Amino acid sequence: MESDEALARAFAEGHTGSFEALVYRYHRPIHAYIQRLLGRTEPAEDLVQETFFRFVREVQRGRVPERVRPWLYRVATNLCRDYWKAAERRSEPGLPEDWSPAVLEKPSVSEIYERLETRQMIRDALDELSEIQKRMVILRFYQDLTYREIAEVLEVPEGTVKAYLFKALRHLREVFEQREPMGKGGEGIAARAISRR
């Protein structure tokens, strides 16, 4: 599989199929990232398209990003920040992230309830973090970026990423242990998920 950087260089040389390959590779992850940051689905697709539009514009100006993945996430992060500022000016409340039962494979009613409850608990716990910690957790555990890539996306030192993530995960674990009913092993579902990270 060609690297992101090889595809970007090929696109700069006029191979439009290379751009299509990058869109195929990153459309869904960037969409999920934006949706998680904003907590709503409505503007996510527009912001994903704007992210790729800016990539095209950057390449057309002869500035091919050296590291494509962090560059795309940095642009998406900045677009979300701009969206929040505009929403504050319009005084629009954030809406909860849409949930679709289509994601599940014929779960029972109790399983649906448990999954919804856990998702809501995780969402609420993330909202208790500072904005930068929340972004780091989402980038690391939902988008699977490395510490180095997160540092590039958020334009902070790698050591800061590690320190903030450590504090964020410790806080999340404490929150889950306080709020979640204990399972058979004496630990809740969400707390176990965090401890495995």
Image (cartoon, grey):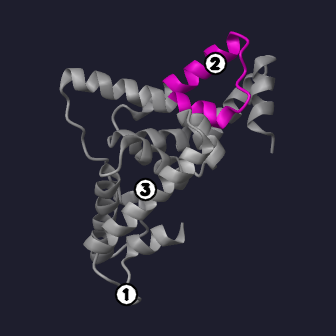
Q: Front-most of 36 and 132?
A: 132
Q: Front-most of 64 and 171?
A: 171
Q: Marks 1 and 3, Cα distance to the nearest angstrom? A: 22 Å
Name the residue located 39 percent from the left edge and 68 percent from the top edge. 173
Q: Marks 1 and 2: which is nearer the front?
A: 1
- Where does the image place residue 57, in percent across and percent down from the top left? 62, 14
Numbered mark located on residue 168 in the image: 3
Disc 1 element: loop
- Where does the image place residue 134, in percent across and percent down from the top left? 41, 47
The amino acid marked with disc number 3 is: Ala
Q: In the rendered image, is residue 46 in sight?
A: no
Q: Marks 3 and 2, Cα distance to the nearest angstrom? A: 35 Å
Decide if residue 10 is on the left or right side of residue 152: right
Numbered mark located on residue 56 in the image: 2
- Where does the image place residue 93, in percent across and percent down from the top left? 20, 35
Asked if residue 29 lies in the magenta stretch, the reply is no
Q: Earlier in the sequence, mark 1 or mark 2?
A: 2
Asked if residue 60 lies in the magenta stretch, the reply is yes
Numbered mark located on residue 186 in the image: 1
For the stretch drawn in magenta, what is the main secondary structure?
A: helix
Q: Earlier in the sequence, mark 3 or mark 2?
A: 2
Name the residue located 46 percent from the left edge and 70 percent from the top edge. 193
Instruction: Please rate how many residues cluster around mark 1, counting C-alpha atoms within 10 Å: few if below 14, some from 14 to 19, many from 20.
Output: few
Name the residue located 43 percent from the left edge and 56 percent from the top edge. 168
Q: Front-most of 61 and 164?
A: 164
Q: Quadrant of the C terminus?
A: bottom right
In the image, the segment drawn in magenta is: 50-75
Decide if residue 87 is on the left or right side of residue 151: left
Name the residue located 32 percent from the left edge and 53 percent from the top edge. 99
